Image: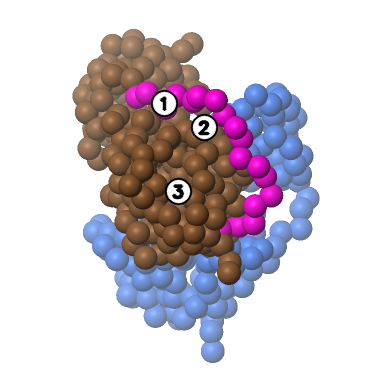
Chain colours: A blue, B brown
Amino acid sequence: MLVELDSLAEVEALHGALLVADLPDVVELVPAATTVLIAVRPGSDGLNRARAVVEAADLSHPPDRTPRQVRLPIVYDGPDLELVASTARLSVDEVVALHSGAEYTVAFCGFAPGFGYLVGLPEPLRQARLDNPRTKVPAGSVGIAGEFTGAYPTASPGGWRLIGRTSAILFDAKRTPDPALLAPGDHVRFEVAS
Amino acid sequence: MSRSLTVVRVGPQTLIQDLGRPGNAHLGVPPSGALDVPALTLANRLVGNPESAAGIEALLGRIQLRANCSCTVAVTGPSVLVSVGDHLVDSHAPVHLRAGDVLGLGAPVGGLRCYVAVSGGIDVPLQLSSRATDILSGIGPDPLRANDVLPLGSVDGLPEGADVLSPSVAPAELVVPVLLGPREDWFDDPHGQLAAGRWTVSQQSNRVGLRLDGTALRRAAAFEARELPSEGVVTGSVQVPANGRPVLFLADHPVTGGYPVIGVVTAEALPRLAQARPGTPVRLQPLR
């Protein structure tokens, strides 16, 4: 079942309500920009129970949960830092202060294992993607695109404006218990590495 | 000595697969796992393993494995010649190997993917609760190569004395039932277009998706220039990219997609997609 919503806030509220409900037959629960995908065990009653949670959910208030707090060390030396500053009509130092001063929430993951789309980006930093995406972005690169900021877990092609890099290992399939550093709902801050 | 197998020869793509790692899509991790699940679970039952044990998925067969210990193996999937040393043995049946014996698979006559289970299961380390190789994200063990040594788990089940099991037969034409949605409204007469379309399996197909050549599906006028924000997709989703030619997502599919999904293949039909060779004619049968 794919549930369509009007905003990221509603996605967060419904995703939270489904997490709290903790339905036994739900195999996958995948929040995205304007949808939540609920996949259930074939032949189970999961779909009916999920539908009941969806219908009862209060989309204007996410349920109270204590989010995980994640700190990502960052060095602001990205190749697009000057471009981001000039687009925002700010100095590089002001961009750094804005980006490292905000608290972000992982809205959803995708693109690659461990890639979190973080929301909460200050308004002046909400900027378009690059006209020509890079064919290779190094692992750990931190970028911005539209209302999102995020860090690339592995080297990959990418069109986000790169402002820095983190030494955090965002995804390691062999790490237990949490191969992915970021999961939907986590709160994230970038801390300038000394 | 610990129990193991040595890979003597590999085919074009020889992978360790089990039932995959569903439940991690929210972290960006595909489900992965054997494409022809009933073939893998049958092979496991034949050698006395739990159905979830890891075995080998051999695209187009042609592999050789040397037993370094006494063990029981079973080969399932399409019809294929199986040998132990110079002797032909049965597929779809438990076969005993002594230390030093070499199991060989020929090329399957029809179909694509052969499965080999070994008593005790292949015991490489788990990654996110699974030993499956995911070719999209790179999670799991590397594809097998000659001289790899595969550790085996301990044996605690007995081989099943099956009578005669027939190999799966790949049909000359693949007819795939599809439940419409969630984005069928993006297309002009989705039911009619799917029913009338004629496709063949593309050479570009892999574990990520079965790509189809043939009829391009038309979007409804109101959706022609629309962009879809990426959304979660499931195995079996029939995604329609900008060129209109459908892609049927298989186990290593990306967890989200930015093109509309016109329908979803029923779960029962997925194993047949795993065995469809490039060039096979395909029809999609929309269900209401």
Q: Are marks 2 and 1 on the same chain?
A: yes
Callout 2: chain: B
Callout 3: chain: B
Q: Are marks 2 and 3 on the same chain?
A: yes
Q: Are marks 3 and 1 in contact (CB under 8 Å)?
A: no
Q: Are marks 2 and 1 in contact (CB under 8 Å)?
A: no
Could you classify mark 3 by the number of other residues whose Cα lies within 10 Å: few (under 14), some (14-19), or many (20 or more)?
Answer: many
Does the magenta run of residues contain B61?
no
Q: CA distance from mark 2 to mark 1?
A: 10 Å
The residue shown at (47%, 57%) is B67
Could you classify mark 1 by the number of other residues whose Cα lies within 10 Å: few (under 14), some (14-19), or many (20 or more)?
Answer: some
Q: Which of the marked residues, 2 or 3, is nearer the chain's N terminus?
A: 2
The residue shown at (69%, 26%) is A44
**In the rendering, which numbered label is found on residue B168?**
1
**In the rendering, which numbered label is found on residue B56?**
3
Q: Amino acid at mark 1?
A: Ser
Q: Which residue is mark 2?
A: B38
Instruction: Decide: is A128 above or below B30.
Output: below
Pick whichever, B69 or B35, lies toward us. B69
Q: CA distance from mark 2 to mark 3?
A: 14 Å
Count of numbered labels shown in the rendering: 3
Q: Amino acid at mark 3?
A: Ile
> For the magenta stretch, what is the residue range?
B152-170
Instruction: Decide: is B87 above or below B266.
Output: below
Q: Which of the marked residues, 2 or 1, is nearer the chain's N terminus?
A: 2
Residue A137: x and y in percent read: 34, 67
Q: Is residue B14 among the parts visible in the rendering?
A: no
Residue A95, by quadrant, is bottom left
Pick whichever, B152 or B238, lies toward us. B152
